[in-house]
Image (cartoon, coloured by chain):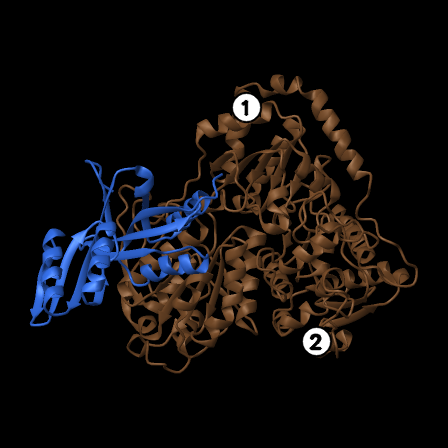
Amino acid sequence: MATTKEKTQSPTRATRVPVAIQMTGAEMVLAALRDHGVDTIFGYPGGAVLPIYDALFKQNSVRHILVRHEQAAVHAAEAYARSTGKIGCVLVTSGPGATNAVTGLVDALMDSIPILCITGQVPTHLIGNDAFQEADTTGITRPATKHNYLVKDINKLSRILHEAIYVAMAGRPGPVLIDLPKDIQFATGDYYGFDAAAEPIGHPTYKPRRDPDPAAIEQALKLLATAKRPIIYGGGGLINSGDEACRLLSELVHLSNFPCTLTLMGLGALPASDKNFIGMLGMHGLVEANYAMHDCDVMLCVGARFDDRVTGKIAAFAPGATKIHIDIDPSSINKNVRVDLPIVADAGAALKALLAGWKKMNLDAARAQHQADLAKWWRQIDGWRARKCLTYKPSASVIKPQLALERLNVHMKELKAKGKDTYITTEVGQHQMWAAQFLHFEAPKHWMTSGGLGTMGYGLPAAMGTQLAHPDALVIDVAGEASILMNIQEMSTILQYRLPVKIFILNNQWMGMVRQWQELLHGSRYSESYSEALPDFVKLAEAFGATGLRIEKPADLDAGIKRMIETPGAVMVDVMVDPKENCFPMIPSGAAHNEMLLGPDDKADPANAEDGMVLV
Amino acid sequence: MSELTERHTLSLKVDNEPGVLARVIGLFSGRGYNIESLTVAEIDKELRLSRITIVTTGTAMIIEQIKNQLDRLVPVHAVRDLTLEGSVIEREMILIKVVGEGENRTQALQLADIFRARVVDATHNSFVFEMTGSPDKLTAFVKLMQPLGLTDLSRTGIVAISRGANGF
């Protein structure tokens, strides 16, 4: 770090003259992080980043969290970002450090999470020579990031650092990578400080649109004014936009009394207990949400992207609906589903404009004429709700995974009443879908799951990142016994930083979702989906220095969950659940929203099963 | 929405920085879009800007996607769909080698004259012609040269600009 931090005299932007400070490239990295308010960075050292680790050693503003695998560094940073709304930062070395981080980067890209990943690179004169631990990092990560940089000139580093953070956060957020050769880390150059209060960061040409076109907003309101069977379909864009966007969504939902469904990424944008919330939609969504999507006449999509897990068969997706799509990313519009009214804007800005227009155009009066239609629509939705699609066959002898999560949800609620927040992360598979169905999120940013990429091994490092951001909250990784093994090494990190993370493993001894698909689509040929030779998770936890618990009987669930919550420090709970349970409801691949399988007795139409088999 | 495949000429203004072409090409291969022709060269040394001209095919929905995806790339300043704008000038250059003697040689020379192709290299039994024109005209010329001893050719790919006073 430079010994003196020069401050400009004038606080106003117009008269502010940037003052260059001489420092090394490695010091610039730390200076930029500090200037942008980054307090935590997840990383793993190696030869090509040693100068940055040396600079890290000599300063106090940025805390470094030493992970045990670079993929986990990115997932932890993702969860840190998702649970705070800030940027997540990663520091890894060249070659294997960078390639290990790739899965995390793609995960962040798919789920639109702002990440700054700094990778070390071999010195510039060795680039292209197949040097030790050299990889073409910018080449490999080009399609894995929103943007990336290879810095070959120390005097460009200052600008690139500020720009990279801007690009990661602006518009649709995403991961940005800076590949920094070792000689550039050692080189000395001019650093231009950044003062967030005094100047907006930016990019000369990359300026995503935030504010909606007023004409489009007016058109949208006209459609909403006369809708008979409206639905609001919200997604992760609401969470990314921020708490204000979620508050505005609630306001619109209540003003209109429209039903609202949320995607996996959007859970928490509207409180789960809200009477207008009709549950998650999609492949394992609720009947009421999917049927309402299918039968609606006006669909207002806010910050969601018509993902194939949501739409099912495109040709049969909401066939009678006039679709309005609000998205900050123009390339998300008309990608999978052709919409009638695209609105390129930030979710919050668009909702604000819709609410202002609603009042200005006096939509309350217009809607009053359609009260009867809306009431009829709600009766229809309540009819679907009455089918109670999440019902499962209870058992007194074996723990149903749904029951385990229902009980966990009860404990979460009790804690909330006492003022303690719970954050949930998940791995990927059946347990993830059950968690989405049975755990209720009352606020945004409390649910961290790998949606787009579906990365097994996400949950444990994500719980780590979340706990670091919220030291006093309860953080639970809802896991499966297969997924948890994918990043199990992070138990070491959790113990090193004394993170009281709880790991709630729904152990069914199968890669459950794979087994379910094999049962439904591949004639019950369970090819390689059995979890053979599992470790004893209680002993495994103890070996890492954590507490291990096992719950085997439904009657022991409450006491076990309570013990997990009350035991200080990291706790791993091995919940032995019904190995044969499948996740319902389910829209088989290639089927429409109204062709859901509701339970084990429902059989997929063989024609669809054939079509579905080739899909994912 | 029409499912008919359309051919569009897109013009991109991009930062002339390492990797920008890889970004554009990677987008096309990664998302399964077609490239029929692609040309790139620097157009402003001071501002370090390049122009990329891409001829692509796809349904109207795909073409719209391609443009939005290109526009999203950080070093891309602007994307213009010259085909959609209506009046576009498209030009391509070709170098074509014709080997032969006697009647064929004379005929090749006569046809080159009709097509306003220039002879840029000649030996006793070969010519290299240079010709600029619309891609269709070039293709017609190639077809005529085939029976006359065409042995090698090199085409630049299409460069394009809009008609009228408006610039990028």
Q: Mark 2 lies on which chain?
A: A
Vertical comparison of A465 with A607: above or below: below
Disc number placed over residue A24 in the picture, else none: none
- Image position, residue A308 (x, y; %): 60, 50
- Image position, residue B65 (x, y; %): 44, 47
Q: Which of marks 1 and 2 is in front?
A: 1
Helix, strand or loop at mark 2: loop
Vertical comparison of A226 with A236: above or below: above
Whether residue A251 sits left or right of residue B109 in the image: it is right
* Amino acid, disc 1: Lys
The residue sitting at the bottom extreme is A132
Tell me if residue A1 can be seen.
Answer: no
Residue under label 1, please give it: A222
Whether residue A105 sits left or right of residue A569 in the image: it is left
* Amino acid, disc 2: Gly
Residue under label 2, please give it: A545
Measured in 3D between alpha carbons, the distance from the residue under mark 1 to the one under mark 2, in whole angstroms, is: 61 Å
- Mark 1 crowdedness (10 Å alpha carbons): few <14, some 14-19, many ≥20: some
- Image position, residue A413 (x, y; %): 76, 48
Whether residue B10 sits left or right of residue A172 in the image: it is left
- Image position, residue B137 (x, y; %): 21, 51
Q: Colour of chain B?
A: blue
The residue sitting at the front extreme is B103
- Residues A435 and A379: in front is A379
Q: In which quarter of the image is residue B35?
A: bottom left
Work out whether disc 1 and disc 2 sit on a shared chain. Answer: yes
- Residues B81 and A458: in front is B81
The residue sitting at the right extreme is A396
Which one of the lettered chains is coloured brown? A
